[in-house]
Amino acid sequence: MIHILTIHWKSDRWIDTQLKYLNHFIKQPFKVYAFLNGIKDVSKHQEKFFYVSTEAIKSHPSKLNLLADLACMNAESSKDYLLFLDGDAFPIASLDPFIEKTLAAYPLAAVQRKENYGDQQPHPCFCITQIDYWKRINGNWHMGDVRWNNTLGKPVGDIGGIMLRKLQQHNASWFKLLRSNQINTDHPVLFGKYHDLVYHHGAGFRSPVMRSDSNQVKFLKTKRLVFNMFAKVLPKKTTIKYFAPFQKLKKENQLLSDEMYNKIQADFNFYESL
């Protein structure tokens, strides 16, 4: 049994898409546990999931940890699988042979977004392990105080930092699903295909500006200083509209995001052209 743990935040636009791909590419039994926060008419989606919570918890890693606890309590076997999956992520190839082969050799498999300036940690957009291993390492998706130097030589941290430390402490060799897009997409991190197995849109529920976008803005430090200065005297909306350093790039990325979303809705096999 696979216990799939996912989060949809303030939007239901990815729910049916995600479930469609899950049902197509997983043949063994699975249950989907979800946080559906800030979604209008959430009642029309509740029966699509094994479990739904609308509790007003803001922390993404906290919600993942809570869903994992619930799945562990509900599972009939400690050999059942926990599959952490972002709401805008889903399989694009059969998961069953991958799970059988990979988790026979590794205790955990997860996306590693090296394209995001060299991120080192397992990312919960897709991560699978067995319940007994999750319990053994006391799995936790919080960032914590874990830092690493990115490819620019700057110390960074992100969701999954504590998981990285736990895997290191247990000397665990984990399977890393790396970006496998065959062509250059319009963004280095968004719209990612990993190991030809999983698609992660990357901007389904948040502003489509990534850490890797920082080198696209000229005079970024100066623009941030100007933004902070005006933020002290002007209304927040006005400051963001006229002085936010990433405002123009945000609009451009959002257009790309909408174009890709529409392509996904129109063509089930969209991933073949990535």
Image (cartoon, grey):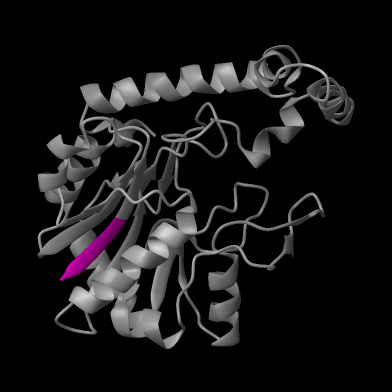
- Residue 74 position by quadrant: bottom left
**Which quarter of the picture shows residue 239?**
top right
Magenta span has 10? no
Dominant secondary-structure state across the stretch colored magenta: strand
* Residue 4 located within the stretch drawn in magenta: yes
Foreground residue, 69 or 257?
69
Count every numbered label the image shows and give the total.
Answer: 0
Residue 13 percent coordinates (x, y) = 28, 30
Camera-side residue of 33 and 178: 33
Q: Is 47 placed above or below 64 here? A: above
The correct choice, above or below, for 200 with respect to 234 in the image is below
Residue 8 sits in quarter: top left
Q: Position of residue 104 (x, y in %)?
A: 30, 81
Q: The N terminus is located in which quarter?
A: bottom left
* Horizontal side, residue 112 vs residue 69: left or right: right
Q: Is residue 258 visible?
A: yes
Residue 221, image x, y percentages: 87, 31
Left-right relation of 136 to 68? right
Residue shown at 60%/76% (left/top)?
165
Q: Which residues are magenta?
A: 1-5
* Residue in view at x 88 percent, y 28 percent: 225
Q: Is residue 197 visible in this depiction of the protein?
A: no
Residue 204 locus on image (x, y percent)? 41, 34
Q: Quadrant of the C terminus?
A: top left
- Residue drawn at point x = 82 percent, y = 54 percent: 153
In the foreground, 181 or 128: 128
Q: In the figure, is residue 160 to the left or right of 124? A: right
